[in-house]
Structures are given as structure tokens and as C-alpha cells.
Image: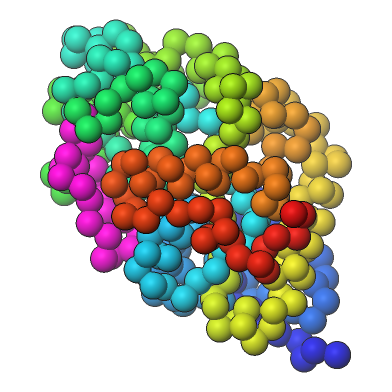
Amino acid sequence: MSKELVLRTVFESRGYTRTVADGTLEIPGVSIDFVDAVPISRAMNAVADGLQFDVGEITLVDYMIARELGRPLVALPIFPNRNFPHDRILYRVDSGIEVPKDLEGKRIGVKSYPQTAPVWGRGILHDQYGVDLNRVTWVALEGAHLDDFRNPPNVEMAPEGSSLAELLASGAIDAADDPGRPWRDRGERWYYDSTGIKPLIPNPAQDAADWYRKTGVYPLLHVIVIKQDVLTARPDIARTLFDAFTTAKQAYLDVLDDPTEMKARGRAIVGSDFLPYGISPNRAAIDTLCEFAYHQKITTTRFQVEDLFGPHALFDE
């Protein structure tokens, strides 16, 4: 029998990962030394660049960058966060923007250029709405989670200490991806206080459903990664962790009856399992994100699914 393996681990403890985090779910041969991080983005540099954890949650685009930079990390086909990005962009009505194509020639704020949600949003702007992404100036608040990454030429850094909401309100940018405050919660969805700010996509749920029906792609954001030396020493650990996260998720889905959570996670569009794990149900989404990252000059390699997920991950193929 294999010796018990202690794994220093960081991921966000959600309803569908909590039993792995707190040890309620026993994992054969494994002890989880869990570090909580809320939001998980605070720990992603430590996982992807600092290599401070045996197992951790990072964005899938972070993982692509890490692979290009030679970081000794390997992805497991566990995707603990995903959503459609169609409702994220807001714009100033005095900017001359009326439809997505009007973003060309404008300045759009993002938290970070290689952040995975904006990568999806930009890719969909191009594919679904015909926006030429090279004709947009992207204004970023932050750099990447990997310090060696360099933004492409049409990305500017915002003044230090600024926020997307402030930049949008002042007119320093014409539109913004998920600008945050000033917002208020009406229980169903967020809306901007000012009548001079509007959502770019008037019917985001319908457009998201149309995108999914056409492509079969349900945008995935985060992935669980493991250090290469851990996987080399214990090849069985990949399937063991996959099974544990899958068991935890299924137990959560079996009792989930929160309509707000179900709607927020896209369940009305994609069906009962809004968190599919494994390669087979996610191959189209992974491949599409690889294309988007390459087209947006985030990676110099046009990755294939097998480049990111090796034989250890092909449980269902």
C-alpha cells in the first residue's frame, strides 16, 4: 500500500469543494493540508509562479502561460469555476458605442489582460459579434499572475490605485469588463447606478444560450493543477484527486435546490451538471480557449488539449 501523501493545497472552498477542503471526504492515501483563500485569485501567483503548493487552483489561461514559461505544473481535468461572460461589459452611452462592433477604436478597461474571463469575453466579442480585437485599446489595472508575462502592444496599464468603476465614471475609458462598484444588488442581477452607463449586450442570457447552442462551449475559468514532481512520484494521485473532487461535486448537485445559484451558474442553459469535469465534456471549451489565448497574443503557442492535459488526465476518453 502506498504511504499516505500529505498535499499542501489551496483552492476556494465552495459548496462543491468543501468536503475535500475540510477533510470530511476521506481520500485514500492522501491527507489534505488545506489553505483557504478568498478570493482564490490572491493565491494564484503563489501557485503558478511561486510553486508554493503541491495542488492549487489557478485560471486556465494562467496555466497556459505557466506551461510556456516552463513551470513544473500539470493540470487535472477539474474545473471548479465557469460561467458565460456575456453580461460583463458596460459602456458609457456618450462614448458613441451602441453595438459591440462600436468597441473598435475605443478604450476598454479590464482587471488584467490575461485574466481568463476577459479572454473569453474578448474571444466571444470577435467570434459572435465580429469585433476586431486589435483595434481596441485594453486598459489593465493589474499584470498577470506570472511575473514574466508581457502584455501585447495594444494594452496599457491604468494609473496605480485606480479602479475600473472610477475610470469608467470619469470617461478615461469608454467601456469596462466587470467594473464593480458603484453597483447595487437587486437580488437577481447587478445593475449600474448611473443612467449614463449601460450593459453592452441587452439580452445576455439569450445570447449566451445562442452561443452555447451553436458551439457547445461552456466557458471554463479555473483548473486544479499539481506539481510535476508530485505526479511523477505518485502517478495514481491524478485519478485519486479527480475522483475525490467529482464525489464532492456530485453530492452537492444531488441536494442543490437554490434557484439563484442554479441560474447564476448557467444551469438553465447547460443542464443539471453545470460543473462538468473530465476532458470529454470540456474538449471543445478547452480547445476554444486555446485558440482565443493564441489569437489575443497571450500565448505564442497554439496549444492543443493534449499539450495541456497529458495521459494522466484522459480518464473518460
Q: Specify whether residue 211 is painted magenta.
A: no
Count of residue discs? 0
The quarter holding residue 168 reads: top left
| Quarter the C terminus occupies | bottom right
Q: Residue drawn at (36%, 46%), measured in percent from left and top? A: 294
Q: Which residues are magenta?
A: 136-156
Task: Answer yes or no: is residue 104 visible.
Answer: yes
Of residues 104 and 118, the one drawn nearer to the viewer in this rendering: 104
Q: Position of residue 31 (x, y in %)?
A: 72, 79
Q: Specify whether residue 140 is painted magenta.
A: yes
Q: How is the image coloured?
A: rainbow
Q: Position of residue 249 (x, y in %)?
A: 76, 50
Q: Residue drawn at (39%, 72%), measured in percent from left and top? A: 70
Vertical order, 280 against 230 (above or below): above
Q: Residue drawn at (61%, 65%), measured in percent from left and top? A: 310
Q: Residue drawn at (75%, 29%), measured in percent from left and top? A: 271
Q: Position of residue 19 (x, y in %)?
A: 76, 60
Task: Answer yes or no: is residue 167 visible.
Answer: no
Vertical order, 260 against 75 (above or below): above
